Image (tube, rainbow, N blue to C red):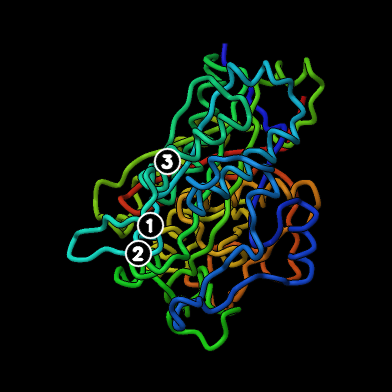
Amino acid sequence: MAQRVVITAMGMVTSLGDSPMEIARSVKTGRAVFAYSGMDSEVVVAPVDNFDVRCYTGRFKNLRYLNRGAAMATAAAVQAVQQASISGSQWETAGLFLGAGPNLDLGGECLHIRQGVMDAEALSALWILRFLPNTAASAIAQLTGVRGENLTVGNACAASLQAVGEAYRKIKDGYLDLALAGGGDSRLSSGALLAYRKAQALCLESDDPQTSSRPFDNGRNGFVPGEGGAFFVLEAADHAEVRRATVLAEICGYGTSMDGDAMTAPRPDGRWAEEAVRSALAQAHMLPEKIDIVSAHGTGTLLNDEVEARVIQRVFDPHRPLVLALKSWIGHLAAACGAAELAVCLSALQTGVWPWIRNLKTPCNPQLNYLRPGGRAVPGNILLQNFGFGGQNGALVIRPWQA
């Protein structure tokens, strides 16, 4: 018999804050951290100011092997475990599911590359660890005591949402009772910005950094890279009930697919992105009209928003769920965007403060029901969706807990 799966704790590192109350304060005051990058004066970024992983982990000798994205994942995971208040022995059989991206800070890590030769006395003996995708998982295991089944997912912008989804499936099907799932990423290094700039994916036309991220607006012209991470404690509902845990939400459906079309652009008809969404709804045993809120991928790029808007319209027509675009607040967190956006949604369920879509003036698809300034969101069933480079698609359905 399938087990119900609940989220009982979370940790987060975002530019809006690292707790639900901080995020609520940021949204209420309209505080979003967007600024020109110090590495490329034409590029706007959404950084996490004053981040220090030691504030979350304390002294830990292996912090030196974590790149910035891995450090943010580790910080969020430690925070989630501390919030859960679960005994150490239970973590030994728990699962660990991580969404991670590549470390593109080549110039920062290897300062002496000359014609393909990079060896130098200053190069760390174990510099490779800062480039391995599972280094964060190793650090998290050492710090939290997790010793069970584990998986590092590298599926681009869908990675951390898929990591949560895979953990959900393992618990639902009875392989685990407890898991830690989420991700972290940072693409604000010179190498990352250069890569996205070469791919013509960045917003480069903005007189004001605060107006640079414009998901679903006709004036959109690229995404704003951000950074951060989030992790969640997932449990079988019976396991959470025995220890009288507070439940933040229930995960009730997950879908994933691949476009098999283009490397950096969504399939024009959105067929397989739609399939991921419909699979998540089917697994949740929900008709489309039961979804109250859609947390869209909403990158602010020309093709993604156009295709995604059509997918939302096709799946939900004539029902019109409220559409969020959280990247207009925190930027595009690449592999970590799904986890961070789930954390923002769970924070909103707790505080009642929902982030409207910033800078949306003329929608590219006026048929959708976008959350605007002054609009209200009624807590209910939420669909989260992320679509990444390489045609990676993921969708997750969550709902407020009902025993």
Q: In the rendered image, which quarter contains the C terminus?
A: top right
Mark 1 or mark 2, which has the lower sequence index? 2
Spatial CA span between label 2 and label 3:
42 Å
Between disc 2 and disc 3, the foreground one is: 2
Residue 281's spot in the image, x, y percent?
52, 36
Which SS class for mark 1?
loop
Estimate the x, y position of residue 235 in percent, counting from the top left. Answer: 65, 24
At x 54%, y 24%, the residue is 95
Could you say whether the residue bearing mark 2 is in a helix, strand or loop?
Answer: loop
- Mark 1 touches mark 3? (CB < 8 Å): no
Q: Residue furthest bottom?
A: 207
Secondary structure of the residue carrying numbered label 3: helix
Count neighbours of disc 3 (C-alpha within 10 A) and say few if under 14, some if 14 to 19, many if 20 or more. Answer: many
What kind of residue is marked 1? Ala
Q: Which residue is mark 3?
A: 276
From this view, report whether residue 211 is shown above or below residue 378: below
- Mark 2 touching mark 3, by CB under 8 A? no
Which numbered disc, 2 or 3, marks the residue that appears first in the sequence? 2
Q: Position of residue 213 (x, y in %)?
A: 53, 73
As measured in the structure, the alpha-carbon distance from the residue carrying label 1 to the one carrying label 2 is 9 Å
Q: Earlier in the sequence, mark 1 or mark 3?
A: 1
Residue 290 appears in view: no
Residue 227 vertical placement versus 178 (above, below): below
User: Which numbered disc covers residue 122?
Assistant: 1
Identify which residue, 187 or 259, lies in the foreground: 187
Residue drawn at x 47%, y 72% as measured from the top left: 364
**Residue 111: which numbered mark, if any?**
2
Picture quarter containing residue 61?
top right
The residue at the point 42 percent across, 76 percent down is: 221
Amino acid type of the residue that numbered disc 3 sits on in the rendered structure: Ala
Does 397 sit left or right of 373 as displayed?
Answer: left
